[in-house]
Amino acid sequence: MFRRPVLQVLHQFVRHASETAASLVLERSLNRVQLLGRVGQDPVLRQAEGKNPVTIFSLATNEMWRSGESEVYQMGDVSQKTTWHRISVFRPGLRDVAYQYVRKGSRIYVEGKIDYGEYMDKNNVRRQATTIIADNIIFLSDQTKEKE
C-alpha cells in the first residue's frame, strides 16, 4: 500500500537529481599556447591602481617555408614571416624572475593561455588586444646578467 507512492516519490527524486547533476557537469575545454622565440624588448613591470602587478614583454616567433618547387636548397627559396606576441606574467614568483632575467634577444620558451581583451586608448577609442598570459617560462640562452 505505501510501497507504490514511496517508489513514485523516489523515482521523481532520482530523475530530478540526475537532471540537476547533468546540468552541473562542466564541459572540459583547453586554452593552451606554447611559444618558442626571441624576446623583442626588455620586460617592464607595471601596476595600475588596485590591480596586480604584471611583467610585460614581446616575443617574436618565425615561420619559414620554401617557395618554389626546387628540391635543391638555395637561399632565395626560403621565405620567412615574423609574428610578435605580447607576453604578460602575473604569477608572483614567475613575474619577478621574468622581470629580472628576461632580456632583449634571449631565446625562451613560454607556456600559457591566450587572452582577448579591450581597452580605451588615449583618444578614447576602443581597441582590442591579444595577450599571452604566461604560466611557465624556460630560458634557453645564457641569462647571467641581472637587471640593475
Image (tube, helix red, strand yellow):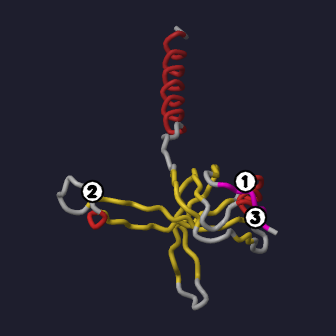
The amino acid type, in three-letter code, at marker 2 is: Tyr
User: Left or right of 124: which side holds 49?
Assistant: right
* Residue placed under numbered mark 1 in the picture: 94
Q: Which residues are magenta?
A: 142-147
Front residue of 72/123: it is 72
Residues at circles 2 and 3 in contact by the CB criterion of under 8 Å: no
Task: Out of 19 and 98, give the one closest to the viewer.
Answer: 98
Q: Which residue is mark 2?
A: 73
Gap in Å between the C-alphas at discs 1 and 3?
13 Å
Is residue 145 located in the magenta-colored stretch of the structure?
A: yes
Distance between the alpha carbons at the discs numbered 2 and 3 = 50 Å
The quarter of the displayed image where residue 106 is located: bottom right
For mark 3, what is the residue?
Answer: 52
Residue 63, image x, y percentages: 39, 60
Point out the tag, 1 or 3, that comes first from the N-terminus: 3
- The percent coordinates of residue 104 (x first, y second) are 63, 68
SS at mark 3 in the image:
loop
Reply above or below: 130 against 143.
below
Residue 119 occupies quadrant: bottom right
Residue at the image point whose x is 52% and y is 24% from the top: 14
Of circles 1 and 2, the one toward us is: 2
Amino acid type shown at disc 3: Asn
Q: Is residue 82 left or right of residue 118?
A: left
Q: Residue furthest left?
A: 69
Q: Nearer the viewer, mark 2 or mark 3?
A: 2
Viewer-closest of 42 and 131? 42
Amino acid at the residue labelled 1:
Leu
Which part of the image, by quadrant, shows the C terminus? Answer: bottom right
Expressed as whole percent of the image width and height from the top left, the position of residue 137 reads: 64, 51
Residue at the outermost right position: 148
